[in-house]
Amino acid sequence: MSTTTSRLQSMTAGELTRRVLNKVPLFILDVRNGSDAADWQIEGESVELLNIPYFDLLEGVDAALEQLPEDRDVLVVCAKEGSSKFVAEQLGEAGRSRVYYLEGGMKAWSEHLEPVLIGQLQDGGSLYQFVRIGKGCLSYMVISDGEAAVIDAVRMTDVFKNFAAEQGAAIKHALDTHLHADHISGGRKLAEQSGGTYWLPPKDAGEVTFDYAKLEEGNIITVGNTKIEIQPVYSPGHTIGSTSFIIDKRYLLTGDILFIESIGRPDLAGKAEDWVGDLYTTLYNRYKELSDDLTVLPAHFGNVTELGSGGAVSARLGDLYKNNPGLQITVETDFRRMVSDHLPQYPNSYQEIRQTNMGKINPDEEQQREMEIGPNRCAVHDK
């Protein structure tokens, strides 16, 4: 951790992520306004949080001091950094030594990606999950014999390029399981930067303004000379084009159709009544045809309880059919009612994000950051 004065200490989003994943006790003082803090927070099994708006601390930090523990590190967070830096400095001047501010604020927290090794594939290949812990997004990279394929890339493409380079691999493919509505895809940009191919389900691409390769069932994509297979499985429901992937006959990447503790919502394109039937068919028929021993790897998580060993988000398909609440309602009419009754509020700026992913609008970098602020809310049960 860096220290800017003898009392003012900072913590990066990466350092915070590792604390959360390793369940290191941490007390967070969130100085954003109450509605922003309630809408989207830093969560963790060993994290305790207190919200006191910055404007309530301008005249002094006594109100915070009496509520802060002295036996744990305290991290002050705000939207961009400035307010938390001021409050952390005041706490330090009041005699508190275990106080830090979050570098880059919640914006940095939203953009951090943590690579997690999921498993070794045949002939030395490997599969990595990139956990965007502050947003709940999950991306993937298949690496084999000097080649890489990235699935559901987020817009921070440098992370994928740098990681592939460190592994001695060139990115040959970028694939999206569907047209995303909660975050801006980096797939097309990554393919252009790397000279690779961008793949998108054609049923989701009716309004896109750019060229793409059609991602369709039966069109197997291979990575490296060992030809690790990425097998598309058409699985509509979250969108009409939603496509899952079976990788190395062991892993099922479900996109936003199936999560660890919930299922995908069918309403982000205004087609809930049309698509909920597709969602039911995918979950209760199409996936039922697959092996129970496949490891499910979703495109999102909604709660920190879904983070497993080392931060990985995964589960055995057969176990999900026993435990996932969205997979326990076998009567379609009951399923339709359950979905409609449990839809959370929409993701922030989801219409603009869809337009961006279609290539219809081109917001600048700062606008993209603002559009993505907040949780993903892609699951039926997420509140």
Image (tube, rainbow, N blue to C red):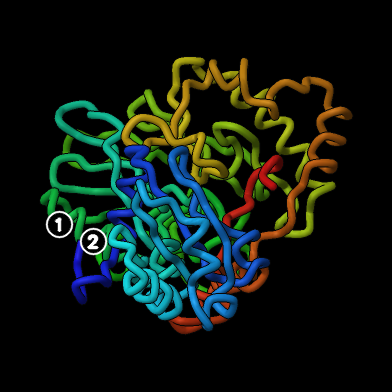
Residue sitting at x 66%, y 44%:
382
- 265 relative to 67, above or below: above
Asked if the residues shown at circle 1 and circle 2 are in contact, with their CB atoms under 8 angstroms apart, the answer is: yes
Residue 191 visible in the current orientation = no
Disc 1 residue type? Ala
Residue 44's disc is: none
Q: Quadrant of residue 99?
A: bottom left
Q: Is residue 21 left or right of residue 355?
A: left
Residue annotated with mark 2: 161
The amino acid marked with disc number 2 is Lys
Q: Is residue 217 left or right of residue 130?
A: right
Dot label at residue 165: 1
Quarter of the N terminus within the rendering: bottom left
Across and down, in percent, residue 295 comes to 43, 25
Q: Nearer the viewer, residue 86 or 34?
A: 86
- Residue 87 at what x, y percent from top left? 43, 74
- Residue drawn at 53 percent across, 62 percent down: 183
Total number of numbered discs in the rendering: 2
**What residue is at 48 percent from the left and 72 percent from the top?**
61
Q: Secondary structure at mark 1?
A: helix
